[in-house]
Image (cartoon, helix red, strand yellow):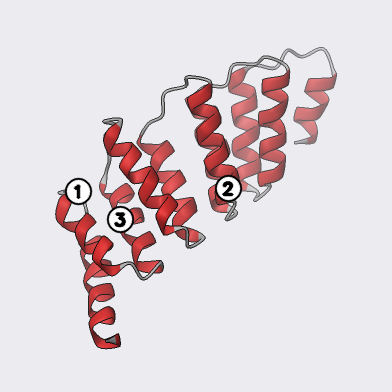
Amino acid sequence: LQLFVSMAQGKVKLDTITCNAAINACKKSGEWGQALEVFRMMSKNEIELDRITFNAAISACEKNNEWINALQLCSVMVQNKVESDTITFCTAISACEKCGQWAKALQHFNLLVETAVESDAITCNAAIRACERGRMFPKALQLLGTTKLASWNGLVIASSAFKGSVTAN
């Protein structure tokens, strides 16, 4: 990151690719705050924020349990009219799931379905795990029943969640 700062202060022109690499380096080293700082610097210096930029920044937040920042980045992405993809939604859903925000996770899963972005088993399983963590067992089973994408892992999560809710009653 020091090399990146030196480049920014010197005569080297920064571009989207260089900044995306810096955000990913920050993400991998657990420096989500630094990743967001690079993101802000890009915006301030009118360097293009593309899908890769947003996904890397959202992922940095997700890996560090910063679900609010991850969702704020999703909002900025929409405001900037940058098209989201499966990675965007999966990462945002996972950020919510890790922090026990099952309602927000489901909200983003439903948004994924509404926008017709192709979802995958990982995304579905993240939404199912969020429901399970929030002890929303009927919702987990409902998700499992409405999607063909949930994997065996999702089935195990939902069925064990349902089993736990039955034995708790």
SS at mark 1 in the image: loop
Describe residue 94's horizontal placement relative to residue 128 as left or right. Answer: right
The mark nearer the N terminus, 3 or 1, is 3
Q: Quadrant of residue 116?
A: top left
- In the depicted structure, whether residue 97 falls above or below residue 37: below
In the image shown, does 157 or 10 lie closer to the viewer?
A: 157
Confirm or deny contact between disc 3 and disc 2 (CB under 8 A): no
**Which quadrant is the C terminus positioned in?**
bottom left
The mark nearer the N terminus, 1 or 2, is 2
How far apart are the two marked residues, 3 and 2, measured between alpha carbons? 21 Å
Q: Quadrant of residue 143?
A: bottom left
Question: Which residue in the protein does label 3 denote?
Answer: 125
Q: Which residue: 65% across, 32% down?
A: 22
In the image shown, does 165 or 14 lie closer to the viewer?
A: 165
- In the depicted structure, whether residue 142 falls above or below residue 5: below
How far apart are the two marked residues, 1 and 2, measured between alpha carbons? 27 Å
Question: Which residue in the protein does label 2 denote?
Answer: 68
